[in-house]
Image: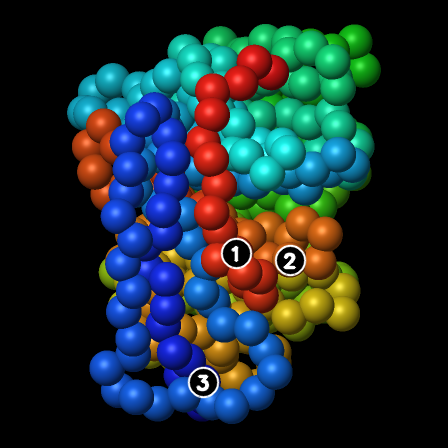
Amino acid sequence: MPVVRHRLMTALVLLVWGCGDDVPANTETDPTGETESDTDAPFSSSVQGGIAGGVMLSGYAHASGMTMVGGTLSAAPGVEPGGPGTLYWLRDGALCRAREVSDHTLWWIDGTGEDAWFAVGERGTILRYDGAALHDESVATDAILYGARAAEPVIAVGGDPFGTGQGEIWRREADGTWLRIHEGLPGVAFKIHEDWIVGTGVAWQMMPDGSLVEHFPPGGARLLTVRKRADDDVWAVGGSDTAVVLHWDGATWNEVPYAPACGNGSLNGVWTEPGADVWVAGFFGAMARYDGEQWDCNAPPITFEHLHATWRHEGTQWWGGGALLSAGGDTALLGRYGEAALDLEVIDCAL
């Protein structure tokens, strides 16, 4: 079984300036008193509460910085879509916020390392940023597009989690139009990374011709995010009530036990790359790292807000989330690992 390392919990809520509202600072310590003495910096940085304008659902590191997407969650899921969509990015020591960049909430962003990217969201929303201007390439579907791959061919995945429970996949053609290449899939497709797609009880490898090869998870596990390091080294996380961590070894899925002290809810996000540890994000403050033998996290967590995604920017691990379990939630959270406590001014900016 993996072992969890307990760390001192500090800086639960930091001072944030935004729209004239001050959030008081608060510091708590680990009541267990258990810590490990080492040189690694703890999960101790978080900006939360007071970042209004949309939860953060995904982040993308690119040439000039990093951009996050999200928006206001639906007040009546399954009845009406969430929105509007929001962009955040770091600039000159401030957290910039651009509200109402789309009618509907944006769930994912991806690019190829340059300042251009694709973002997808509810009611078929697809935005393309070319480094200078934002272009609306939304498609005709009522589905929520939860994931995107910016590498050619560009792919968007999603489905209808509140009605049919079925998934669909869209491909961007050479002329810039979008073609739905799969519909009526047996589970909502939540995320894509390289040639892997995961969702509600489903997992596929996408072939170069767009066909799908089934590698469904054991027990019909609900998988929210996937990251591939190699053909025999793929990681996926999810769960419905408790955390699920799966590893594909090239032939089968193997469950990796998750340390209970690192969170008691399901996981939403995973990030890794060749030679890197596995980092996860989840409900009730789940921010953790797995080095192949043990889990590393704060216990208790530095926040009981919810994390949706984690990503790497300039050697630092970042998390985004917010009021994910609130109907109409629009409060964002931003965290990171291994740096001084965040103290960012939140300002409204033009894209």
Q: CA distance from mark 2 to mark 1?
A: 7 Å
Residue 65 in the image, given as x and y percentages of width and height: 69, 37
- Whether residue 251 appears in this view of the structure is no
Query: Which disc is residue 316 wearing?
Result: 2
The amino acid type, in three-letter code, at marker 2 is Thr
Q: Secondary structure at mark 1?
A: strand
Q: Are marks 3 and 1 in contact (CB under 8 Å)?
A: no
Which residue is depicted at the point 34% across and 76% down? 299
Mark positioned earlier in the residue sequence (2 or 3): 3
Mark positioned earlier in the residue sequence (2 or 1): 2
- Whether residue 71 appears in this view of the structure is yes
Which residue is depicted at the point 38% across and 57% down? 282
Residue 164 to residue 7: above or below: above
Q: Which residue is mark 3?
A: 5
Q: CA distance from mark 3 to mark 1?
A: 18 Å
Viewport quadrant of the C terminus: top right
Label 2: few (<14), some or many (≥20) within 10 Å? few
Query: Which disc is residue 294 wearing?
Result: none
Which residue is depicted at the point 25% across and 18% down? 80
The amino acid type, in three-letter code, at marker 1 is Arg
Residue 183 to residue 27: above or below: above
Q: Secondary structure at mark 3?
A: strand
Q: Which residue is mark 1?
A: 336
